[in-house]
Amino acid sequence: MLKQLITAAVIFSMALPLYATDSDYDVVIRGGRVLDGAGNPWVPADVAVKNGLIVKVGEVTGLGVREIDATGKYVTPGWIDMMDQSGEALRHVGLAPNKINMGVTTLIGGEGGTPVEAEEIDAYFHELETKGISVNFGTYYSATQARVAVLGEGDDDPTPAQLEEMKKLVATAMDAGAMGITTALIYPPSAYHKTANLIELARVAGSKGGLYASHIRGESAEFLDAVKEAIRIGEEGGAGVEIFHLKAAYYPNWGKDMKEALKLIDAARARGVNVAADLYPYVAGGTGLEVTAPNWVYADGVEKALERLRDPAIRAKLKDEIKAGPTPSWTNLVYVSGGWKNVVLANSYLDEYTRFHGKNFDDIGRELNRDPADVAWDIMLKAYPERPFALYFMMSEDDVRTAMKAPWASIGSDAASALKEGDFDALGLPHPRSYGTFPRIVAHYVRDEGVLTLPEAIRKMTSWPAARMGLMGRGLIREGLKADITVFDFDQIEDTASWENPTAKPKGIDYVLVNGGIVLDAGHHTGATPGKVLRGPGYKPVTVVNKD
């Protein structure tokens, strides 16, 4: 009998996996379909993580302190948000719950620049690292920050000496670890930048390996000229170019302008210009109500602009300009959206208008027996210094699909992290992109519509943006690289955020690891803050000299 028991024990032990007696790894993700991020088809493999790195891909026989069963699920590199707005939010709350819930592990912020001046960027980065963040975070510095620091907010051209001061600020920011410089050329005072001056600033960023990234000067009738300008700034300035949230926002030219823009970018790339773009997968943009007035209104600063908006005679002039359509100096989002019926009040910051949130301004105007333009400007005046937001339904679905298929297009949410899960993002803009951008790519455009293959979609959200930003230690499932990993169920993934419910949490994203730390565990944020600040290529560490 004893012999039989011994024999049975030996046979049973031979059937067990050959695990080490002690844990060899911090985390082992077992049995998943691994998409490496390079665009290759999935392979069945385990992924082992130790000390923040991917150390084994394939059959992992050792045991992890934490074992994750990914059977039937996809294991991919962590997703990268190429157009983030969290620079200020992360100073207050580093958890970025809406980003983590979307499978995002890395944010590239800075369309509006850094929340501190150029000289303070290094200290700002240390602040984030000390407080702790759940995501990796890198940021651009804004050329407009440099402009305002030297010139103020008016529509003035810098003298040669002032331009040199602006260039010094850009150099300071690059040395501190900025990824490059940005502009947002539809918004005053950024709109007052001249092309020649931006070329000079791009030279500074480019000389230190940085990009020139831009919300281009116009996305409507002047869209193609604005794309050409962005390419020119990078080409003559010696900097790579990133066009933020690429969109053809002019309904008379839907189906035409986007195709021409892609040709312009392809031609520039063919002659050696490092230009690409990102986009979000929605037909409406979201921004402040201030864009409903022409840029000249703001030429003498905010206080003067508010004074002008109170003047009935000026309002009459502005209404005529809205009806006349876009100009080279003003995108005119009301016109390009097809009128006030396609502009929806998103957040007024005013109790008396809360009942109108989610309604278009034509309907609001009829209910109040007022011109919709007057309603919009009254909200601006009453809410100041808050920035009321609207949704502008100005793109076509076909154009979104067309842009998405460009091989050099990546994905950016144009949204900030939320300070609390379920709240609006920290900007206060209730747009579903804050909670739905990345799962929507997979659920809607891959699974439901077949616009992209899954390997290609993952490439656009991982290895391509990582390479684009010089993050060569991330963006792939490869041994030796940083363990930023997203695990999701392809059948269950869903962007539940909608226009009516823009803060709904997505479904089907189960685990998110950032630098090897589990931040999303079975769909729940763990509160972990393993994120790192990602400094740009020009970074020069500050050397502290001990004088004792």
Image (cartoon, rainbow, N blue to C red):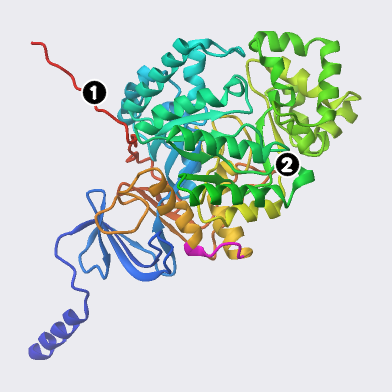
Label 2 vs 1, first from the N-terminus: 2
Q: Is residue 348 above or below residue 339?
A: above
Q: Is residue 300 above or below residue 217?
A: above
145 left or right of 169 in image: right
Q: Main secondary structure of the magenta part?
A: loop
Q: Residues within 10 Å of mark 2 (few under 14, many from 20)?
A: many
Q: Is residue 505 visible?
A: no
Query: Is 66 contained in the magenta span?
Result: no
Give the camera-side residue of 66 and 479: 479
Q: Quadrant of the C terminus?
A: top left
Location of residue 118 in the rendering, given as x and y in whole percent from the top left corner: 39, 20
Question: What's the magenta region?
Answer: 450-455
Badges 2 and 1: C-beta atoms under 8 Å apart? no
- Residue for badge 2: 394
Give the camera-side residue of 75 and 339: 339
Location of residue 122 in the rendering, given as x and y in whole percent from the top left corner: 32, 24
Residue in the picture at 48% in, 39% down: 241
- Residue for badge 1: 542
> What kind of element bears circle 2?
loop
Q: Which mark is residue 151?
A: none
337 left or right of 465 in image: right
Location of residue 98 in the rendering, given as x and y in whole percent from the top left corner: 51, 42
Residue in the picture at 28% in, 52% down: 481
Q: Amino acid at mark 1?
A: Val
> What kind of element bears circle 1?
loop
Q: Residues within 10 Å of mark 1 (few under 14, many from 20)?
A: few
Q: Amino acid at mark 2?
A: Met
